[in-house]
Image (spheres, rainbow, N blue to C red):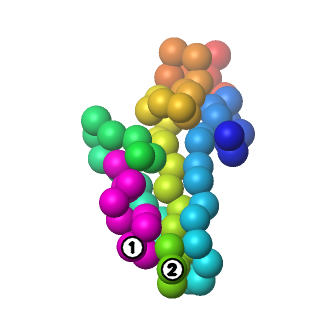
Amino acid sequence: MPFFARDGADLYYEVHGDGPPLVLAHGAGGNHTSWWQQVPHFRERRRCVTFAHRGFAPSTDRPNGQPPGAA
């Protein structure tokens, strides 16, 4: 599974298709799978990037949700 490590959190992402990028960001109560119907439609002509925000599975958050540099 592809993850991007940043500021103590691991962000899960997926990339589908080829072409100009189209980034799909979910709202509260969702995750990267929220776009399962849109990705097949757009991936023929766009590079679709989906991800799960911090704290939304399978992404993680910093311990106790602390901001970077917090003690």
Residue 52 or 9: which is nearer the viewer?
Answer: 52
The numbered disc on residue 44 is 2
Of helix, strand and loop, which one carries label 2?
loop
Instruction: Answer whether residue 12 is magenta in the image.
Output: no
Locate the C terminus by quadrant: top right
Against 19, is 59 above or below?
A: above
Residue 18, picture quadrant: bottom right
Magenta region: which residues?
34-42
Residue type, label 2: Glu
Magenta stretch mostly in which secondary structure?
helix
Residue 6 seen in the figure? no
Residue 37 image position (x, y, % from top left): 34, 60
Instruction: Answer whether residue 36 is magenta in the image.
Output: yes
Residue 5 image position (x, y, % from top left): 71, 39
Residue 1, picture quadrant: top right
Residue at image x 60%, y 61%? 15
Residue 28 or 49: which is nearer the viewer?
Answer: 49
Residue 13 seen in the figure? yes
Q: CA distance from mark 2 to mark 1?
A: 7 Å
The numbered disc on residue 41 is 1
Residue type, label 1: His
Residue 4 or 13: which is nearer the viewer?
Answer: 13
Of helix, strand and loop, which one carries label 1?
helix
Judge left or right: residue 1 versus residue 22. Answer: right
10 Å crowding of disc 2: few (<14), some (14-19), many (20+): few
Residue 24 image position (x, y, % from top left): 42, 61
Residue at image x 45%, y 47%? 32
